[in-house]
Amino acid sequence: MGLDDCIFCKIIKGEIPSEKLYETEQVIAFKDISPASPHHYLIIPKIHKASLNEFDQEHKLILGEILLAAKEIAVKQGFAESGYRTVINTGKDGGQTVHHLHMHLLAGREHKWPPG
Ligand code: AMP
Ligand code: ZN
C-alpha cells in the first residue's frame, strides 16, 4: 500500500523522520516541517489517496476520523477552546503541494479570513 515516491507514505512507513503526535489504525498526525502557526500539524490517512477528489462514499469513516483527530489533538494540546483552523488544500487552485491527502491543523494565533 502507498506510493514509493510519496513523501507522506514514507513518513507512514518510518522511512522519513517526523514528529508524530497521534496515531490510530487508519490515520496519523505529525508536525508540519515548516510551521505557519505556533501549532501546525498534518493529519493524514494511512492509505495513499492523492487528494480529496479520490475519496468516495466508502471512505466516509476515514474522513470522519481525520476530523475527529483534529478535535482530539486540539483538546490534548490545550487549544480546543481558544480555537483552531482546519484546512484541506486540493489541486492547483487550492494550493496543494504534497499529493497525499492531508488536513492542516493550525492554532496558537488568530487566523484571518479569507485566507490568501
Ligand atoms: P499543501 O500545500 O497543503 O500540500 O501542504 C503540504 C505541507 O506539507 C506543507 O505545509 C509542508 O510544510 C509540509 N511538509 C512537506 N514535507 C514535509 C515533511 N517531510 N514533514 C512534515 N511536513 C512536511
Ligand atoms: Zn502517499
Image: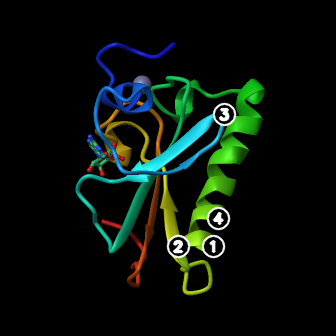
* Mark 4 and mark 3 residues within 8 Å of each other at the beta carbon: no
Q: Is residue 17 above or below residue 107?
A: above
- Give the spatial CA distance, label 2 vs label 1: 6 Å
* Mark 4 and mark 1 residues within 8 Å of each other at the beta carbon: yes
- Which quarter of the figure has residue 8? top left
Q: Secondary structure at mark 1?
A: helix
Q: Which mark is residue 77?
A: 2
Q: Work out whether mark 3 precedes mark 2 in sequence or the reverse, and give the earlier one.
A: 3
Q: Work out whether mark 4 precedes mark 3 in sequence or the reverse, and give the earlier one.
A: 3
Give the residue type that dot 4 points to: Lys
Give the residue type that dot 2 points to: Gln
The percent coordinates of residue 37 (x first, y second) are 32, 71
Is label 4's Cβ within 8 Å of ligand 1? no
Give the residue type that dot 3 points to: Glu
Q: Label 1: which residue? A: 75
- Give the spatial CA distance, label 4 vs label 2: 10 Å
Q: Which mark is residue 25?
A: 3
Give the residue type that dot 1 points to: Val
* Mark 2 and mark 1 residues within 8 Å of each other at the beta carbon: yes
Q: Work out whether mark 3 precedes mark 1 in sequence or the reverse, and give the earlier one.
A: 3
| Residue at x 34%, y 41% (from the top left corner) | 96
Q: Label 4: which residue? A: 71
The percent coordinates of residue 25 (x first, y second) are 66, 34
* Mark 4 and mark 2 residues within 8 Å of each other at the beta carbon: no
Is label 1's Cβ within 8 Å of ligand 1? no
Q: What is the number of callouts on the image?
A: 4
- Give the spatial CA distance, label 4 vs label 3: 17 Å
Callout 3: few (<14), some (14-19), or many (20+) C-alpha neighbours within 10 Å? few
Q: Nearer the viewer, residue 110 or 74?
A: 74
Residue 15 shown left or right of residue 81 in the figure: left
